């Protein structure tokens, strides 16, 4: 299953790489697809995040929020059909549950050993906008 989460963005979707420009080091990556495998990627109104990685020494709330802001802006421009963002995470990762529970409109469903999360793109953009208003 992990292999399919890594390969599907390469074969069917997109990958955003975060690179340290000075050291030319990979610091993070995000892989996603438009549509779902269950519907042969025809349901383009759904953007499913397949894999997300950030070097542990760089993880922080400000970086998470900037990444979400960039991602939602990019997806909005890249595919006007997208209405929903969804992803899966380990049901045993309580740190992630706590993090995602801070986003009011985020819906979580337990499916065995995994949690399924979904949120409308507009709701996620609104959440990000709360932190990036011009002062």
Image (cartoon, rainbow, N blue to C red):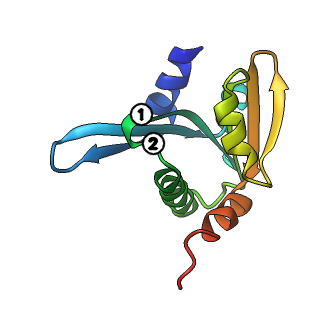
How crowded pointer 1 is (Cα within 10 Å; few <14, some 14-19, many 20+) is rated as few
The numbered dot on residue 56 is 1
Quadrant in which residue 17 is drawn: top left
Residue 59 marker: 2
Q: Residue at x 55, y 16 (%)?
A: 2
Can residue 12 be seen from the camera position used here?
yes
Q: Position of residue 117 (x, y in %)?
A: 74, 38
Task: Specify whether residue 36 is in view.
Answer: no
Q: Is residue 8 above or below residue 122?
A: above
Residue 124, quarter of the rendered image: bottom right
Q: How many marks?
A: 2
* Badge 1 element: helix
> SS at mark 2?
loop
Report whether 27 appears left or right of 103.
left
The picture places residue 73, in percent across and down from the top left corner, at 53, 63
Residue 14 in the image: x percent, y percent?
Answer: 46, 41
Residues at circles 1 and 2 in contact by the CB criterion of under 8 Å: yes
Quarter of the image with the N terminus in it: top right
In this rendering, position of residue 97 left or right of residue 107: left
38 or 17, nearer to the observer = 17
Q: CA distance from mark 1 to mark 2?
A: 5 Å
């Amino acid at each position: 299953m992990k292999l399919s989460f890594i390969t599907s963005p390469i074969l069917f979707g997109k990958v955003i790489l975060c690179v340290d420009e000075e050291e030319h080091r990979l610091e993070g990556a995000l892989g996603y697809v438009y549509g779902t495998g269950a519907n042969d990627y025809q349901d383009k109104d759904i953007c499913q995040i397949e894999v997300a990685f950030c070097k542990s020494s760089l993880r922080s709330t400000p970086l998470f929020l900037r990444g979400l802001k960039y991602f939602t802006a990019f997806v909005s421009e890249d595919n006007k059909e997208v209405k929903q963002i969804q992803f899966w995470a380990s049901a045993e990762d309580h740190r992630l549950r706590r993090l995602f529970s801070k986003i009011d409109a985020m819906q979580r469903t337990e499916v065995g050993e995994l949690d399924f999360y979904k949120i409308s793109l507009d709701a996620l953009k609104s959440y990000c906008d709360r932190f990036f208003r011009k002062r």
